[in-house]
Amino acid sequence: MRLCDDKKIVAFIADLYEKAGVDRETAELHGVGLVEASLRGVDSHGIMRTAAYFERYRKKAINVKPDIKVVAGEKAFVVMDADNASGFVASRYAMEHAIMLAREYHIAAVCVKNSNHFGAAALYAQMAVDAGMVGMASTNVRPNITAPGAKGRVVGNNPFAIGIPTYDDYPFMLDMALSVVAGGKLKMAIRKGEKIPLGWATDVEGNPTDDPKKGFDGYFLPVGGFKGLGIAYVIDMLCGVMTGGAFSDHIKSMYAEPDDPSGTCHMFIAVDCDAIIGKEELRARIAEYRQYIRSIPVVGDAPPLSFPGEIEENCKRERQKNGIPLPYSIYRELEAYAERYQIPFSIEK
């Protein structure tokens, strides 16, 4: 394990992505997105994915000069065509547009079609929070979870994030996939050489497995059984079916089909809190709510209940101070890219 500096890794990722023809601004944006996920402890969507996105850029699976534009809808509800842009680029563009519309209409939704994997959903909910708004971000992905009694993959684990400003040291931030865990956690377990708990996934035959490779190649299990499955259906319909974009098995996998555009679709919603409640009143009421959650009695030595976003924010502060822990396999992978493309490599804290 190596402890690495967040700013140095952002610069390295930007240098690397420029080698694939990505402009500097976009390359830095992508680096910030990956490193921000790792800072918050969401390693499954962070630095470990650097190589996967780079190879997709290099193989022209992602359009480095997209023409992103509104193609349907009006006023506070529109659909954008991402023109096969990076999901990081299209999603920032779309949430910025949603925030702009929400300033006029108080609530706005921007859907995106013909995009690619957008990383951690919280990145975009946070954009709205930073603007003093409630932010919601969701995306569909290629089917990767099964259903009770079904054979094979049924629907994607379609993640979503909801951020609510607290006007305090950190916002409320819920970011979750609709499988028991995100697929990236299995990829991270593979890189670390670790087993996974039973109940995360099955192998291709539908048998429970603690082997992350068999689980990743098999089927993820939905959170909450049919309830989680139902929410995954909803997100696929809102993001893909309703927009005229790709849905279910029309979506390509960035890992199984790395040379092809994914066709991923997203939805972003921004809500102007000032339309219904003043900033100071909201601050006080959320502080009361947070205190209520923390005051709930716990069993034995269990820790107090945490406010969604608290764990990630504490992790970010610790990692900014002490460094982001990178498994040696990932560190060596980045080092190999530096050697191949003759990029200075100095990312340790």
Image (tube, rainbow, N blue to C red):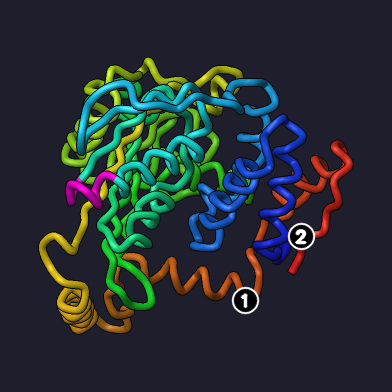
Residue 25 drawn at (x, y percent): 63, 44
In the rendered image, which residue does mark 1 sit on? 321
In the rendered image, which residue does mark 2 sit on? 347
The residues colored magenta run 101-107
Alpha carbons under labels 2 and 1: distance apart: 14 Å
For the N terminus, give its image quadrant.
Answer: bottom right
| Quarter assignment of residue 163 | bottom left
In percent of the image, x 63 and y 64: which residue is there?
Answer: 324
Q: Is residue 67 magenta?
A: no
| Quarter assignment of residue 141 | top left
As helix, strand or loop, the secondary structure at mark 1 comes to helix
Q: Main secondary structure of the magenta part?
A: helix
For the C terminus, give its image quadrant.
Answer: bottom right
Badge 1 crowding class, 10 Å Cα cut-off, few under 14, some 14 to 19, many 20 or more, is few
**Most foreground residue, 26 or 198:** 26
> Can residue 34 be seen at all in this image of the molecule?
yes
As helix, strand or loop, the secondary structure at mark 2 comes to loop
In percent of the image, x 52 and y 20: which residue is there?
Answer: 261
Residue 35 drawn at (x, y percent): 59, 55
**Amino acid at circle 2:** Ile
In the displayed structure, does residue 301 sit left or right of residue 261?
left
> Can residue 298 be seen at all in this image of the molecule?
no
As displayed, is residue 336 above or below residue 128? above
| Quarter assignment of residue 348 | bottom right
